[in-house]
Image (cartoon, helix red, strand yellow):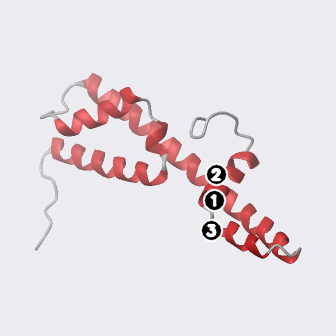
Amino acid sequence: MEIQAPSTFSQRVKSHLKKTIVTSKRRGAWFSLERREKSILYLSLKLNVKFESLQLLRALVSVLKKLEQQGETMHAWIQRGTKLAWAFSEFAVSAGNDNAINWRNDRSYAFFLGRVLLGVKGGAFRT
């Protein structure tokens, strides 16, 4: 069975929106959006929209840019935090704390360390 590519512009836009929403939820960036921003994306998918309105396209681009920035930021926090978690874990294990080996795979811990390392203040997912 062969998957066909979306043929119309509206289908391509909706396909891109679906992929972006799934990816942003996996990265955690989705949860940083305001309700209004999420609604714009959901309604664009649910309603029969032709994406001809310049205002709608501008709103979509604005939300997609925000998701991209948030996704990159959170990825950087986790990446840097994971390196720090490994270093702390190695030190703690060498000092006799055998349970510290679990710190290496704790995503929440890595996320926290990444935020602290970069000096981020505020709520859980706000920048």
Contact flag, marks 1 and 2 (Cβ < 8 Å) = yes
In whole angstroms, how far apart are the C-alphas of marks 3 and 1?
Answer: 12 Å
In which quadrant is the N terminus drawn? bottom left
The amino acid pointed to by label 2 is Trp
Of mark 3 and mark 1, the one earlier in the sequence is 1
The amino acid pointed to by label 1 is Gln
Residue at point 39%, 53% (across, down): 23
Contact flag, marks 3 and 2 (Cβ < 8 Å) = no
The image shows residue 69 at horizontal and vertical percentages of 52, 42
Number of labels in the image equals 3
Locate residue 17: give its quadrant. top left
- In the depicted structure, whether residue 82 falls above or below residue 54: below
Locate residue 91: give its quadrant. bottom right
Q: Nearer the viewer, residue 84 or 51?
A: 84
The image shows residue 97 at horizontal and vertical percentages of 82, 72
Residue at point 69%, 57% (across, down): 81
Q: Is residue 40 left or right of residue 108?
A: left
In whole angstroms, how far apart are the C-alphas of marks 1 and 2?
Answer: 6 Å
Q: Nearer the viewer, mark 3 or mark 1?
A: 3
- In the depicted structure, whether residue 68 falls above or below residue 52: below
Q: Residue furthest right?
A: 95
* Disc 3: which residue: 105
**What kind of element bears circle 1?**
helix
* Disc 1: which residue: 79
The amino acid pointed to by label 3 is Asn
* Disc 2: which residue: 77
How crowded pointer 1 is (Cα within 10 Å; few <14, some 14-19, many 20+) is rated as some
